Structures are given as structure tokens and as C-alpha cells.
Image (cartoon, rainbow, N blue to C red):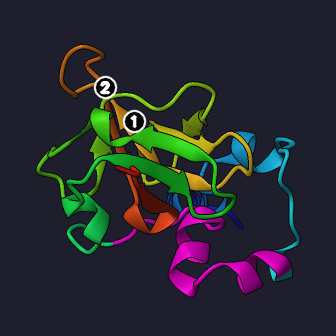
């Protein structure tokens, strides 16, 4: 026999389970995961190529802890590349200190990134991924400096830095 208490309890548990699944299960990043990219590898190949931290961010859409990346403090002229496929994604000319603890840029290089909707963690954000391999780089926000007003907040572990040749 179903009474009101049982019905309300089951509805509450079902809603909570759905919310947890949405936040932690699919991570809301199906668009990037299902897209076709120029560089594709099996999970085993990615694991051999990347460090565990790089794999966590680039392939599992993880986030490194704020303030842990040396690339946040990188001040030299040069180019930031995707750690998965070596595609140049950001120029040091567009880098700035956002105070967030992650490397931040006000614009990507042309034809370097793709974006998708990220509905994880009970919010909607714009996920940034490498357009060539689909590796998760970070997120873009509308609170950056002029001239774009964008803050491309990237995971340093998802990138490598190549200094400009003098």
C-alpha cells in the first residue's frame, strides 16, 4: 500500500539521485565526448601518452587544484600547447593574471579550441576543449578584461609551454 509519506520519500530520493547523476555521472559534456576529432586514441593509448594528472583533466574532464600549476606564473613570451596533441592553443600575448590560481587568457589562438555546454555541479558553464583532440582544457567566463571581456580559465596540466625563440 502506497501512502503519502512513502510517495514523498521516494520522490525526494529519486530527485536527489538524478541530481547526483547529473553532477557527477555524465558531467554534462556529451557534445565534446561524442564529437569526431582529428586526433583520436584509445583510452589505453591516452593513458600511455599522458601523466595521470593530464589524463584526469584532458580525458576525464577533471580540474587541477587552484594555484598548483607553474604555468599560472609563466611570464615568458611563447605559446601554450595542448598537452594531448601539441596544438598551439594560446599565446602569451593574451595571458593575464586573473587571480584565480589558474592560467587565464582573454582569447585563444585562431582555430584552436572548441566549446560545449557543461551542466555539471548544478550549474551551466561553457567548457573549452582542444579542437584537434577534444581534450578538456578548462572553461570560459564573461568576466575577463578588454578587448574580449572573456576569461579563458585553463588547467595548466592540460597544456605545455614553448618559449619563443629569440
Residue 8 visible in the shown view: no
Q: Is residue 25 left or right of residue 54?
A: right
- Residue 26: within the magenta? no
Residue denoted by label 2: 150
Query: Magenta-highlighted stretch: main secondary structure?
Result: helix
Circles 1 and 2 in contact, beta carbons < 8 Å: yes
The residue under the point 66% across, 66% down is: 59
Label 1 CA crowd tier, 10 Å (few <14, some 14–19, many 20+)? many
The residue under the point 25% across, 19% down is: 149
- Residue 62: within the magenta? yes
Q: Which span of residues is magenta-colored?
A: 45-64
Q: Is residue 4 left or right of residue 86?
A: left
Residue denoted by label 1: 140
How far apart marks 1 and 2 lie (CA) works out to 7 Å
Q: Is residue 11 left or right of residue 133?
A: left
Under circle 1, the secondary element is strand
Amino acid at each position: 500500500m502506497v501512502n503519502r509519506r512513502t510517495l514523498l520519500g521516494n520522490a525526494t530520493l529519486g530527485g536527489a539521485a538524478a541530481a547526483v547523476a547529473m553532477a557527477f555521472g555524465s558531467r554534462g559534456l556529451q557534445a565534446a565526448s561524442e564529437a569526431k576529432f582529428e586526433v583520436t586514441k584509445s583510452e589505453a593509448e591516452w593513458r600511455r601518452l599522458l601523466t595521470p594528472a593530464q589524463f584526469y583533466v584532458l580525458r576525464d574532464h577533471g580540474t587541477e587544484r587552484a594555484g598548483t600549476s607553474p604555468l599560472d606564473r609563466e611570464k615568458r613570451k611563447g605559446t601554450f600547447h595542448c598537452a594531448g596533441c601539441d596544438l598551439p592553443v594560446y599565446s602569451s600575448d593574451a595571458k593575464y593574471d586573473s587571480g584565480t590560481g589558474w592560467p587565464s587568457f582573454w582569447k585563444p589562438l585562431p582555430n584552436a579550441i572548441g566549446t560545449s555546454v557543461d551542466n555539471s555541479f548544478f550549474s551551466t558553464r561553457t567548457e573549452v576543449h582542444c579542437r584537434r583532440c577534444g581534450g578538456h582544457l578548462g572553461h570560459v567566463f564573461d568576466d575577463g578584461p578588454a578587448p574580449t571581456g572573456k576569461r579563458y580559465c585553463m588547467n595548466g596540466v592540460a597544456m605545455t609551454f614553448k618559449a619563443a625563440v629569440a
